[in-house]
Amino acid sequence: MTEILCAASKSITDLYIAKYPLEKQMEYNSKQLNLSPVPSITKTDIKNMSKVEMAALLMELLEKK
């Protein structure tokens, strides 16, 4: 009975989030919000880039690693 009262005093969100460590929460939030550091560039975008733009993109990707 006390378990039911404790659960009732917390929100569903609190009970759900409590199961996951903060690192996992941040990882999942990043995926949901599309905060990944990988740019969403298509092959067509790259084909249409100038040499200067390609070089800048390559440098940006290399700096992130």
Image (cartoon, rainbow, N blue to C red):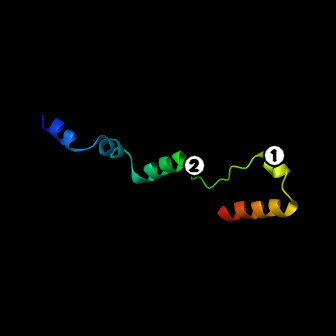
Label 1 sits on what residue type? Thr
Percent x, y of residue 12? 30, 40
In the picture as drawn, the residue positioned furthest to the left comes out as 1
Q: How many marks?
A: 2
Please say if 40 is above or below 58. above
In the rendered structure, which disc, 1 or 2, sits on the residue that comes first in sequence? 2
Q: Along the horizontal axis of the image, is 59 left or right of 31?
A: right
SS under mark 1: helix
Percent x, y of residue 30? 52, 51
Label 2, on which residue? 34
Circle 2 residues within 10 Å: few <14, some 14–19, many ≥20: few
Which residue shows up at 65% across the image and 53% down it? 38
User: In the rendered view of the protein, which quadrant contains the N terminus?
Assistant: top left
Please say if 61 is above or below 18. below
Percent x, y of residue 39? 67, 53
Which residue shows up at 65% across the image and 62% down it? 64
Label 1, on which residue? 44
Residue 26, label in figure: none
Which residue shows up at 79% across the image and 46% down it? 43
Circle 1 residues within 10 Å: few <14, some 14–19, many ≥20: few
Label 2 sits on what residue type? Asn
Question: Disc 1 and disc 2: Cα gap in Å?
Answer: 21 Å
Percent x, y of residue 57? 76, 60
